[in-house]
Image (cartoon, rainbow, N blue to C red):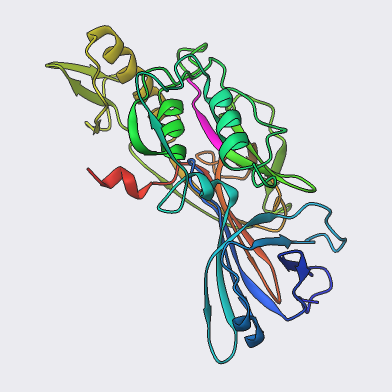
Protein backbone atom coordinates (compact mmCIF):
# COMPACT_ATOMS: atom_id res chain seq x y z
CA UNK A 1 0.00 0.00 0.00
CA UNK A 2 1.48 3.34 -1.00
CA UNK A 3 -1.11 5.87 0.15
CA UNK A 4 -2.47 6.82 3.55
CA UNK A 5 -5.67 8.16 2.01
CA UNK A 6 -7.84 5.20 1.06
CA UNK A 7 -9.41 7.19 -1.79
CA UNK A 8 -6.01 7.90 -3.37
CA UNK A 9 -4.06 4.67 -3.14
CA UNK A 10 -1.66 4.35 -6.05
CA UNK A 11 0.25 1.18 -6.86
CA UNK A 12 3.71 1.01 -8.40
CA UNK A 13 5.28 -1.84 -10.35
CA UNK A 14 8.88 -2.25 -11.51
CA UNK A 15 9.68 -5.08 -13.91
CA UNK A 16 6.28 -6.62 -13.13
CA UNK A 17 6.81 -6.67 -9.35
CA UNK A 18 4.65 -4.54 -7.07
CA UNK A 19 6.61 -2.13 -4.89
CA UNK A 20 5.09 -2.41 -1.42
CA UNK A 21 7.16 0.37 0.15
CA UNK A 22 5.59 3.82 0.35
CA UNK A 23 6.30 6.14 -2.55
CA UNK A 24 5.55 9.63 -3.80
CA UNK A 25 6.32 11.72 -6.83
CA UNK A 26 5.08 13.51 -9.93
CA UNK A 27 4.06 12.63 -13.48
CA UNK A 28 4.55 15.36 -16.06
CA UNK A 29 2.69 15.22 -19.37
CA UNK A 30 4.46 18.12 -21.05
CA UNK A 31 2.76 17.96 -24.43
CA UNK A 32 4.03 19.51 -27.67
CA UNK A 33 5.57 16.16 -28.72
CA UNK A 34 7.76 16.03 -25.61
CA UNK A 35 8.34 12.87 -23.61
CA UNK A 36 6.24 12.22 -20.48
CA UNK A 37 8.27 11.88 -17.29
CA UNK A 38 7.78 10.12 -13.96
CA UNK A 39 9.79 11.17 -10.91
CA UNK A 40 9.24 8.91 -7.92
CA UNK A 41 10.86 8.49 -4.52
CA UNK A 42 10.55 5.04 -2.96
CA UNK A 43 11.20 4.58 0.76
CA UNK A 44 13.25 1.44 0.24
CA UNK A 45 17.06 1.32 0.34
CA UNK A 46 17.14 -2.35 -0.72
CA UNK A 47 16.45 -1.33 -4.32
CA UNK A 48 20.10 -0.29 -4.56
CA UNK A 49 20.92 -3.99 -4.93
CA UNK A 50 19.10 -4.13 -8.27
CA UNK A 51 20.01 -2.79 -11.68
CA UNK A 52 16.91 -0.77 -12.47
CA UNK A 53 18.13 0.85 -15.68
CA UNK A 54 15.65 0.42 -18.56
CA UNK A 55 13.33 -1.70 -16.43
CA UNK A 56 9.61 -1.27 -17.14
CA UNK A 57 7.83 0.86 -14.55
CA UNK A 58 4.06 1.26 -14.21
CA UNK A 59 2.04 3.55 -11.97
CA UNK A 60 -1.66 2.95 -11.34
CA UNK A 61 -3.21 6.07 -9.86
CA UNK A 62 -6.44 4.49 -8.54
CA UNK A 63 -7.70 8.05 -8.05
CA UNK A 64 -11.38 7.14 -7.67
CA UNK A 65 -10.71 4.64 -4.90
CA UNK A 66 -11.14 1.59 -7.15
CA UNK A 67 -8.35 -0.38 -8.81
CA UNK A 68 -7.43 0.90 -12.29
CA UNK A 69 -6.86 -1.70 -15.00
CA UNK A 70 -4.73 0.68 -17.10
CA UNK A 71 -1.74 2.59 -15.68
CA UNK A 72 -1.68 6.39 -15.70
CA UNK A 73 1.98 6.05 -16.70
CA UNK A 74 4.07 3.27 -18.19
CA UNK A 75 7.68 3.75 -19.18
CA UNK A 76 11.33 2.86 -18.71
CA UNK A 77 13.67 3.72 -15.84
CA UNK A 78 16.32 6.12 -17.15
CA UNK A 79 18.16 6.98 -13.96
CA UNK A 80 18.07 6.13 -10.27
CA UNK A 81 19.81 7.50 -7.19
CA UNK A 82 20.20 5.65 -3.92
CA UNK A 83 20.50 7.41 -0.57
CA UNK A 84 20.63 6.11 2.98
CA UNK A 85 16.85 6.52 3.21
CA UNK A 86 15.30 5.96 -0.20
CA UNK A 87 15.64 5.41 -3.93
CA UNK A 88 14.84 8.17 -6.41
CA UNK A 89 13.85 7.14 -9.93
CA UNK A 90 13.38 9.08 -13.15
CA UNK A 91 11.48 7.29 -15.91
CA UNK A 92 10.32 8.34 -19.37
CA UNK A 93 7.56 7.04 -21.61
CA UNK A 94 8.36 4.54 -24.36
CA UNK A 95 8.95 7.23 -27.01
CA UNK A 96 12.35 7.69 -25.37
CA UNK A 97 13.63 4.63 -27.25
CA UNK A 98 13.17 6.64 -30.45
CA UNK A 99 15.10 9.75 -29.43
CA UNK A 100 18.10 11.12 -27.56
CA UNK A 101 21.56 9.71 -27.04
CA UNK A 102 20.20 6.24 -26.32
CA UNK A 103 17.40 6.39 -28.87
CA UNK A 104 17.13 4.92 -32.34
CA UNK A 105 19.18 6.54 -35.10
CA UNK A 106 18.24 6.23 -38.76
CA UNK A 107 20.17 6.56 -42.01
CA UNK A 108 18.35 7.72 -45.11
CA UNK A 109 20.01 8.29 -48.49
CA UNK A 110 19.08 8.32 -52.18
CA UNK A 111 19.11 4.50 -52.32
CA UNK A 112 17.65 3.50 -48.96
CA UNK A 113 15.00 5.98 -47.87
CA UNK A 114 11.40 6.40 -46.79
CA UNK A 115 10.18 8.35 -49.83
CA UNK A 116 6.53 7.63 -50.51
CA UNK A 117 5.84 6.46 -46.96
CA UNK A 118 3.59 8.36 -44.61
CA UNK A 119 4.82 9.14 -41.11
CA UNK A 120 2.48 6.44 -39.77
CA UNK A 121 3.79 3.83 -42.21
CA UNK A 122 7.38 4.78 -41.46
CA UNK A 123 6.81 4.56 -37.71
CA UNK A 124 5.08 1.21 -38.01
CA UNK A 125 7.85 -0.36 -40.10
CA UNK A 126 10.68 1.16 -38.06
CA UNK A 127 9.26 0.23 -34.67
CA UNK A 128 8.27 -3.24 -35.84
CA UNK A 129 11.72 -3.96 -37.32
CA UNK A 130 14.09 -2.12 -34.97
CA UNK A 131 12.30 -1.82 -31.61
CA UNK A 132 9.76 -4.63 -31.16
CA UNK A 133 11.83 -7.52 -32.52
CA UNK A 134 12.03 -9.39 -29.17
CA UNK A 135 9.04 -7.98 -27.29
CA UNK A 136 6.48 -5.21 -27.71
CA UNK A 137 8.06 -2.04 -26.35
CA UNK A 138 5.81 0.36 -28.26
CA UNK A 139 2.27 -0.72 -29.09
CA UNK A 140 1.18 -0.19 -32.71
CA UNK A 141 -2.50 -1.13 -32.43
CA UNK A 142 -3.62 2.51 -32.28
CA UNK A 143 -1.10 3.99 -34.72
CA UNK A 144 -2.78 6.12 -37.35
CA UNK A 145 -1.81 8.74 -39.94
CA UNK A 146 -2.22 12.46 -40.19
CA UNK A 147 -4.96 13.74 -42.46
CA UNK A 148 -3.82 15.30 -44.74
CA UNK A 149 -1.04 12.74 -44.86
CA UNK A 150 2.49 13.66 -43.86
CA UNK A 151 5.02 12.10 -46.24
CA UNK A 152 8.64 11.26 -45.49
CA UNK A 153 9.76 12.40 -48.95
CA UNK A 154 13.21 13.93 -49.16
CA UNK A 155 14.40 13.01 -45.67
CA UNK A 156 18.15 12.39 -45.89
CA UNK A 157 20.93 12.09 -43.36
CA UNK A 158 23.20 9.90 -41.26
CA UNK A 159 22.51 8.99 -37.62
CA UNK A 160 19.33 11.06 -37.64
CA UNK A 161 17.25 11.11 -34.48
CA UNK A 162 14.22 8.99 -35.44
CA UNK A 163 11.65 10.79 -33.29
CA UNK A 164 12.82 14.31 -34.10
CA UNK A 165 12.78 13.46 -37.80
CA UNK A 166 9.12 12.46 -37.82
CA UNK A 167 8.21 15.42 -35.59
CA UNK A 168 9.89 17.75 -38.08
CA UNK A 169 7.80 16.26 -40.91
CA UNK A 170 4.57 16.49 -38.89
CA UNK A 171 5.26 20.10 -37.94
CA UNK A 172 4.95 21.03 -41.62
CA UNK A 173 1.58 19.28 -41.95
CA UNK A 174 -1.48 21.41 -41.28
CA UNK A 175 -5.18 20.74 -41.76
CA UNK A 176 -6.27 24.09 -43.18
CA UNK A 177 -9.73 22.99 -44.32
CA UNK A 178 -10.96 25.93 -42.26
CA UNK A 179 -8.54 28.68 -43.32
CA UNK A 180 -9.27 30.72 -40.20
CA UNK A 181 -8.73 27.81 -37.83
CA UNK A 182 -5.83 25.62 -39.03
CA UNK A 183 -5.14 22.50 -36.99
CA UNK A 184 -1.72 20.99 -36.34
CA UNK A 185 -0.64 17.46 -35.35
CA UNK A 186 1.37 15.98 -32.50
CA UNK A 187 2.59 12.58 -31.35
CA UNK A 188 1.37 11.16 -28.05
CA UNK A 189 1.07 7.84 -26.23
CA UNK A 190 -2.12 6.17 -25.00
CA UNK A 191 -1.87 3.53 -22.31
CA UNK A 192 -3.46 0.13 -22.86
CA UNK A 193 -3.90 -2.85 -20.59
CA UNK A 194 -0.70 -4.52 -21.79
CA UNK A 195 1.18 -1.94 -23.88
CA UNK A 196 1.73 1.75 -24.42
CA UNK A 197 0.50 2.75 -27.88
CA UNK A 198 2.00 5.49 -30.01
CA UNK A 199 -0.55 7.72 -31.79
CA UNK A 200 -0.67 10.73 -34.09
CA UNK A 201 -3.22 13.26 -32.83
CA UNK A 202 -4.76 16.22 -34.62
CA UNK A 203 -5.61 19.26 -32.55
CA UNK A 204 -9.35 19.61 -32.06
CA UNK A 205 -11.13 22.77 -33.10
CA UNK A 206 -12.18 24.96 -30.21
CA UNK A 207 -15.70 24.74 -31.67
CA UNK A 208 -15.75 21.03 -30.83
CA UNK A 209 -18.28 20.01 -28.18
CA UNK A 210 -16.20 19.85 -24.99
CA UNK A 211 -15.86 16.48 -23.33
CA UNK A 212 -15.52 17.92 -19.81
CA UNK A 213 -16.72 21.03 -18.01
CA UNK A 214 -15.09 22.69 -15.02
CA UNK A 215 -16.37 25.35 -12.63
CA UNK A 216 -15.52 26.56 -9.14
CA UNK A 217 -18.36 24.36 -7.89
CA UNK A 218 -17.25 21.37 -9.93
CA UNK A 219 -13.59 20.55 -10.31
CA UNK A 220 -11.65 23.83 -10.02
CA UNK A 221 -9.68 24.39 -6.80
CA UNK A 222 -7.79 27.38 -8.17
CA UNK A 223 -7.31 29.15 -11.50
CA UNK A 224 -4.66 31.51 -12.80
CA UNK A 225 -4.23 32.86 -16.28
CA UNK A 226 -1.98 35.15 -18.26
CA UNK A 227 -3.11 36.83 -21.44
CA UNK A 228 -0.34 37.32 -23.97
CA UNK A 229 0.06 39.30 -27.15
CA UNK A 230 0.11 36.69 -29.94
CA UNK A 231 2.43 37.05 -32.92
CA UNK A 232 0.95 39.16 -35.69
CA UNK A 233 3.82 39.85 -38.11
CA UNK A 234 6.23 37.81 -40.23
CA UNK A 235 9.08 39.24 -42.32
CA UNK A 236 10.39 37.04 -45.13
CA UNK A 237 12.08 37.40 -48.51
CA UNK A 238 11.82 41.19 -48.33
CA UNK A 239 8.09 40.96 -47.68
CA UNK A 240 5.83 41.47 -44.67
CA UNK A 241 2.77 39.42 -43.71
CA UNK A 242 0.55 41.06 -41.09
CA UNK A 243 -2.39 39.70 -39.13
CA UNK A 244 -5.09 42.42 -38.82
CA UNK A 245 -4.11 46.03 -38.18
CA UNK A 246 -2.09 45.09 -35.08
CA UNK A 247 -3.93 47.24 -32.50
CA UNK A 248 -1.83 45.78 -29.66
CA UNK A 249 1.45 46.57 -31.38
CA UNK A 250 3.82 44.51 -33.47
CA UNK A 251 4.91 41.06 -32.32
CA UNK A 252 6.96 39.10 -34.84
CA UNK A 253 7.83 35.44 -35.33
CA UNK A 254 10.32 33.73 -37.62
CA UNK A 255 9.50 30.94 -40.03
CA UNK A 256 11.55 28.57 -42.13
CA UNK A 257 11.60 30.04 -45.61
CA UNK A 258 11.20 27.89 -48.71
CA UNK A 259 12.42 28.61 -52.22
CA UNK A 260 8.87 29.29 -53.37
CA UNK A 261 7.49 32.72 -52.36
CA UNK A 262 3.88 31.53 -52.51
CA UNK A 263 4.59 28.54 -50.30
CA UNK A 264 6.42 30.73 -47.78
CA UNK A 265 3.49 33.17 -47.76
CA UNK A 266 1.08 30.32 -46.98
CA UNK A 267 3.41 29.14 -44.22
CA UNK A 268 3.53 32.65 -42.74
CA UNK A 269 -0.27 32.90 -42.78
CA UNK A 270 -0.72 29.50 -41.17
CA UNK A 271 1.85 30.13 -38.43
CA UNK A 272 0.24 33.44 -37.51
CA UNK A 273 -3.25 31.93 -37.41
CA UNK A 274 -2.03 29.09 -35.19
CA UNK A 275 -0.42 31.65 -32.90
CA UNK A 276 -3.63 33.67 -32.72
CA UNK A 277 -5.50 30.58 -31.51
CA UNK A 278 -3.27 30.33 -28.42
CA UNK A 279 -3.70 33.62 -26.63
CA UNK A 280 -4.01 32.51 -23.01
CA UNK A 281 -1.89 30.57 -20.57
CA UNK A 282 -4.44 29.11 -18.14
CA UNK A 283 -3.45 26.93 -15.20
CA UNK A 284 -6.06 24.97 -13.22
CA UNK A 285 -5.59 23.02 -10.02
CA UNK A 286 -8.41 20.48 -10.26
CA UNK A 287 -10.10 17.75 -8.28
CA UNK A 288 -11.17 15.76 -11.35
CA UNK A 289 -10.03 15.08 -14.90
CA UNK A 290 -6.77 13.34 -13.98
CA UNK A 291 -7.09 10.95 -16.91
CA UNK A 292 -8.02 13.47 -19.63
CA UNK A 293 -5.75 13.13 -22.66
CA UNK A 294 -3.80 16.03 -24.11
CA UNK A 295 -5.53 17.94 -26.90
CA UNK A 296 -8.98 17.46 -25.35
CA UNK A 297 -11.38 20.41 -25.48
CA UNK A 298 -12.52 21.53 -22.02
CA UNK A 299 -15.17 24.09 -21.08
CA UNK A 300 -14.57 26.55 -18.26
CA UNK A 301 -17.77 27.82 -16.66
CA UNK A 302 -16.37 30.74 -14.66
CA UNK A 303 -17.49 34.35 -14.07
CA UNK A 304 -14.54 35.92 -15.90
CA UNK A 305 -15.57 36.46 -19.52
CA UNK A 306 -11.92 36.46 -20.64
CA UNK A 307 -11.52 32.87 -19.45
CA UNK A 308 -15.00 31.37 -19.71
CA UNK A 309 -15.51 29.13 -22.72
CA UNK A 310 -13.72 26.33 -24.57
CA UNK A 311 -10.00 25.66 -24.25
CA UNK A 312 -7.56 22.98 -25.38
CA UNK A 313 -5.63 20.90 -22.83
CA UNK A 314 -1.93 21.31 -23.60
CA UNK A 315 -0.19 19.73 -20.61
CA UNK A 316 -0.81 18.38 -17.12
CA UNK A 317 1.09 17.45 -13.99
CA UNK A 318 0.00 15.01 -11.30
CA UNK A 319 1.52 14.75 -7.84
CA UNK A 320 0.88 11.61 -5.79
CA UNK A 321 1.79 10.23 -2.39
CA UNK A 322 -0.09 10.71 0.88
CA UNK A 323 -2.41 12.94 -1.14
CA UNK A 324 -2.97 13.66 -4.80
CA UNK A 325 -3.21 16.82 -6.88
CA UNK A 326 -3.49 17.66 -10.56
CA UNK A 327 -2.68 20.79 -12.53
CA UNK A 328 -4.00 21.30 -16.07
CA UNK A 329 -2.47 23.84 -18.45
CA UNK A 330 -4.74 25.06 -21.23
CA UNK A 331 -4.25 26.68 -24.63
CA UNK A 332 -0.66 27.85 -24.76
CA UNK A 333 1.70 25.20 -26.08
CA UNK A 334 4.68 24.59 -23.75
CA UNK A 335 8.01 26.02 -24.82
CA UNK A 336 10.63 23.54 -25.96
CA UNK A 337 14.26 24.09 -25.05
CA UNK A 338 15.11 23.45 -28.68
CA UNK A 339 13.14 26.59 -29.58
CA UNK A 340 16.00 28.60 -28.04
CA UNK A 341 18.84 26.63 -29.62
CA UNK A 342 20.22 27.59 -32.99
Which residue occupies the extreme left position in the image?
238
The residue at the point 64 percent across, 74 percent down is 24
| The C terminus: image quadrant | top left
190 is higher (above) or lower (below) than 2: above
Quadrant in which the N terminus appears: bottom right
> Residue 178 location in percent, x, y?
51, 12
Residue 186 among those drawn in magenta:
yes
For image coordinates 56% across by 71% down, the residue present is: 89
40 left or right of 256?
right
Front-lying residue, 242 or 115? 115
The answer to whether any part of residue 201 appears in the image is no
Question: As rendered, which of 297 and 70 lies closer to the eye?
Answer: 70
- 98 vs 227, left or right, is right
Total count of labels:
0
Judge whether 69 appears above or below 211 on screen.
Answer: below
* Relative to 190, residue 78 above or below: below
Q: Quadrant of residue 164?
A: top left
Pick out the residue farthest to the bottom. Answer: 84
In this view, the residue in front, 285 or 154, is 154
Name the spot of residue 208 as percent of width and height, x first: 65, 25
Residue in the foreground of this view, choosing between 90 and 121: 121
Residue 66, position in %: x, y?
88, 61
Q: Residue 239, how many percent across, how many down? A: 16, 15
Quarter of the image where one finds residue 18: bottom right
Taking the image as drawn, is residue 35 in sight? yes
Q: Which residues are magenta?
A: 182-187
Residue placed farthest to the right in the image? 66
Which residue is drawn at the image coordinates 53% and 87% (left, top)? 83
Magenta stretch encompasses residue 290: no
Residue in view at x 27 percent, y 15 percent: 264
Amino acid sequence: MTQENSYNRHTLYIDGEEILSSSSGTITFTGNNQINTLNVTINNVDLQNYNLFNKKIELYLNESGSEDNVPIFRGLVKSFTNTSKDTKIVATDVRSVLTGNEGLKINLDDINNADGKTVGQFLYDTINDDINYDETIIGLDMLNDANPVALMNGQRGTNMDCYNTIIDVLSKTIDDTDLLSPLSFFVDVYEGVNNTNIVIVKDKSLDTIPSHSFSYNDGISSLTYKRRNPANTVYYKGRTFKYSNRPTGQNTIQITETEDVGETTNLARTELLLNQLQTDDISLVVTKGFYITLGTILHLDVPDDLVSGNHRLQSKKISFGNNISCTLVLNRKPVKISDYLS
